[in-house]
Image (cartoon, rainbow, N blue to C red):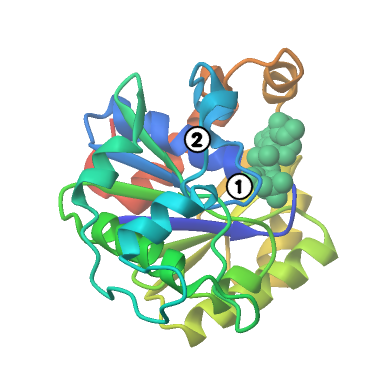
Amino acid sequence: MKIAISGKGGVGKTTIMAMLADYLNKQGRDVLVIDADPSPHMAQSLGVENVDNIIPIADMKEMLTQRSGKTEGSPFYNLNPQVDDLLADFIVEKNGIKLMVLGAIQTGDKGCACAESTVLKRMLTKLLLSPTQMVLLDMEAGVEHLGRGTIAGVDQLLVVVIPSKSSVRTALKVKKLAQDVKIANVAFVGNLVHDQDDEAFLAEALGETPIAFFPDAAAVRKIERDGEPIIKAAGEVAVATAALATFLLPEVAG
Ligand SMILES: Nc1ncnc2c1ncn2[C@@H]1O[C@H](COP(=O)(O)OP(=O)(O)OP(=O)(O)O)[C@@H](O)[C@H]1O
Ligand SMILES: [Mg+2]
């Protein structure tokens, strides 16, 4: 199953994805997290050591060009580059959770590094095709990436939304664009929810009830300020994570 997460900036996408990855890993799932945010933050959230040593694959331009088979001055490159060995090379592992840091993929019309992005896209497609893995894709904020096709082929999009009008506006826009690119399942996840009024506001403004509500947790704030990995969070956020995982995969209820 392939799950991506989206929503307005700073609403808690990385936090929730890291918690979900940790929960599913502890339930014995084979979890691969892909950090597709140009400002990657997932490694730190998962507690990977030497985070600064991880170079996003998209930044390895020379390697990507080489792999595409493109030579200087030539407009031609291989549309089906061999990438299997790269997949193994660029995955780091922490407590059984696999992580790949993708970085910023340039696929715009202008300045498009097409040879490189072909290699990256091929890697992503291969990862998304693996049948046994849970692939969790952490995305950058906003809606632009939905037009880029990075998340085409995911089974489920989670849209994180906090109880504010502007967050709801972005969430509704994300849902519409996701449906336009034919993502089969799109669900809202409430975060920074204080009380039942917040829950009711979200349900009403979104036109449907989010599948899980994460509280505004002092434990999460403390962990972040102490520079600890977020997956250490226990208590209410762990309960919300279990509820989210159970919705996504009823058989993991544990
Ligand atoms: N449930 C929560 N309770 C308390 N603090 C939270 C909660 N969820 C997220 N935060 C805090 O909010 C901040 C933003 O969270 P996070 O980085 O997960 O958001 P994001 O949506 O991934 O941001 P970006 O758009 O920059 O990628 C962090 O400092 C995080 O610790
Ligand atoms: Mg993030």
Above or below, 123 against 85 in this view is below
The location of residue 233, given as percent across then percent down, is 56, 20
Observer-nearest of 100 and 196: 100
Looking at the picture, which amino acid does disc 1 mark? Answer: Lys
| Residue at the image point whose x is 50% and y is 35% from the top | 18
| Residue 12 visible to an observer of this rendering | no
Above or below, 213 against 223 in this view is below
Quarter where residue 204 is shown? bottom right
Give the residue at the far front of this rendering. 73
Q: Residues within 10 Å of mark 2 (few under 14, many from 20)?
A: many
- What is the number of the mark on residue 18? 2
The location of residue 30, given as percent across then percent down, is 23, 37
Q: Which quarter of the image is occupied by the C terminus?
A: top left
Q: Secondary structure at mark 1?
A: helix
The location of residue 24, given as percent across then percent down, is 33, 35
- Assess whether mark 2 and mark 1 are in contact (beta carbons under 8 angstroms): no
Q: Residues within 10 Å of mark 1 (few under 14, many from 20)?
A: many
Query: Between disc 1 and disc 2, whose residue precedes?
Result: 1
Instruction: For marks 1 and 2, give the CA distance.
Output: 9 Å
Looking at the picture, which amino acid does disc 2 mark? Answer: Ala
Q: Quadrant of ligand 1?
A: top right
Which residue in the structure is indicated by mark 1? 13
Does the beta carbon at disc 1 come under 8 Å from ligand 1? Answer: yes
| Residue at the image point whose x is 50% and y is 26% from the top | 46
Above or below, 8 against 32 in this view is below
